[in-house]
């Protein structure tokens, strides 16, 4: 990991993941720019570039006006091949390294490995995961030289700034604490037996920041997941333990749920990952235990 102050530009910067990244980068003493539409406040000390990234001409003009060379650019909100192409066009000559935040939902839930590695993979071709994969391919097949690039594939991200819940029907559930405290039985698809490896947002931020000044990360695609593999139901039980309440779980059958919600198939599989690539490329390996991270998130919500 780098130890000197860097010039970092975030696309995003005031949301859950991007806001956590901004916070971590400022704590490390870096100089920060953030591209947002200005709908939410940025942390003090971040230089705002206010525009909609979908206004491609306005984005190009703003970067031209800024006339800066960044050590690291992080695209926190790239969702399509066009977004990735915009990254290459705008930053190829202006960034030393660009990190694109992808997702573990690029993997086809029906054809996974356990643990899933970045190489031996089958991919979705449409929807959110398929579009992220198309964005990844712009970097893989394009010419970014002399800019270095890295793609990260986080799984379920949790931490302060987001809602609790990692599985339907209690994914990002604004009422989860209230439900558990009220003794309500939780309805989880497959009884919550799917394995997960949630990643604490601050750990993801550290992994992303460790790409800067790291030639070994160039051209790499990395799973980013937490240190603990648990059944999804355990995630809810930990929250119950933090609140001092027992959690009761009712099973929703997987097949009927899948038939009723074809758009949510990516949740209906084990989501566990080979993280050896992070170590091989000397990137920061996530270490916050699920219990510690969930405690911090629950406390932030109470
Ligand atoms: N959450 C998860 O569990 C998970 C899992 C895997 C991967 N991911 C990936 O992680 C990344 C971060 O996700 P997130 O939901 O936490 O995002 P986020 O950081 O909350 O992103 C929102 C940020 O982007 C800005 N923004 C949104 N639309 C914009 C636009 N059109 N132009 C300019 N700025 C815009 C928002 O500010 P304004 O509203 O002011 O514009 C805000 O600062 C995404 O790439 C997502 O696919 C998330």
Image: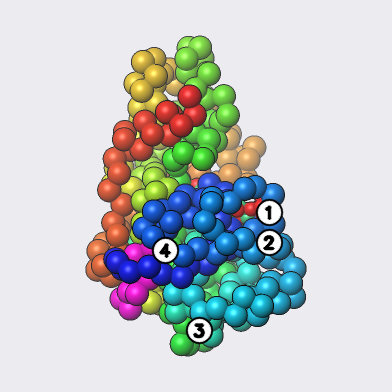
Distance CA(mark 2)–CA(mark 3): 26 Å
| Residue linked to disc 3 | 144
Q: Are marks 1 and 2 in contact (CB under 8 Å)?
A: yes
Mark positioned earlier in the residue sequence (1 or 3): 1
Magenta residues span 209-216
Query: Which secondary structure class fits the magenta region best?
Result: loop
Give SS at disc 1. loop
Residue drawn at 34 percent across, 74 percent down = 213
Viewer-nearest of discs 2 and 3: 2
Distance CA(mark 3)–CA(mark 4): 24 Å
Mark positioned earlier in the residue sequence (2 or 4): 4
Residue 95 coordinates in the image, percent (x, y): 49, 78
Give SS at disc 3. loop
Viewer-nearest of discs 3 and 4: 4
Outermost residue on the top side: it is 182
Give SS at disc 4. loop
| Residue linked to disc 1 | 38
| Residue linked to disc 2 | 50
Residue 159 coordinates in the image, percent (x, y): 44, 40
Q: Are marks 3 and 4 in contact (CB under 8 Å)?
A: no
Q: Name the one closer to the observer, 183 or 97.
A: 97
Which corner quadrant of the image does residue 134 belong to? bottom right
Mark positioned earlier in the residue sequence (1 or 2): 1
């Amino acid at each position: 990991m780098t130890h000197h102050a860097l010039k970092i530009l975030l696309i995003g910067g005031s949301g859950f993941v991007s806001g956590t990244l901004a916070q971590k980068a400022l704590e490390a003493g870096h100089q920060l720019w953030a591209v947002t539409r200005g709908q939410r406040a940025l942390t003090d000390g971040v230089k705002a570039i206010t525009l909609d990234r979908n206004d491609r001409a306005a984005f190009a003009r703003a970067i031209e006006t800024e006339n800066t060379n960044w050590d690291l650019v992080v695209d926190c909100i790239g969702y399509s091949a066009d977004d990735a192409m915009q990254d290459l066009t705008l930053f190829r000559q202006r960034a030393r390294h660009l990190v694109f935040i992808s997702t573990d939902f690029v993997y086809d839930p029906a054809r996974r490995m356990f643990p899933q590695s970045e190489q031996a993979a089958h991919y979705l071709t449409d929807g959110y995961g398929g579009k992220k994969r198309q964005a990844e391919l712009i970097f893989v097949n394009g010419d970014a030289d002399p800019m270095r690039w890295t793609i990260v594939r986080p799984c379920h991200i949790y931490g302060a700034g987001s809602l609790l819940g990692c599985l339907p029907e209690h994914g990002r559930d604004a009422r989860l604490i209230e439900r558990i405290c009220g003794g309500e039985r939780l309805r989880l698809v497959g009884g919550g037996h799917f394995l997960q490896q949630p990643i604490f947002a601050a750990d993801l931020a550290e992994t992303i920041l460790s790409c800067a000044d790291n030639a070994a990360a160039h051209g790499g695609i990395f799973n980013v997941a937490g240190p603990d593999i648990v059944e999804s139901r355990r995630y809810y039980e930990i929250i119950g333990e933090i609140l001092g309440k027992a959690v009761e779980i009712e099973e929703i059958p997987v097949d009927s749920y899948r038939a009723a919600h074809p758009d949510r198939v990516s949740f209906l599989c084990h989501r566990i990952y080979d993280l050896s690539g992070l170590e091989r490329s000397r990137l920061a390996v996530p270490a916050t235990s699920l219990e510690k991270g969930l405690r911090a998130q629950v406390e932030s919500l109470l």
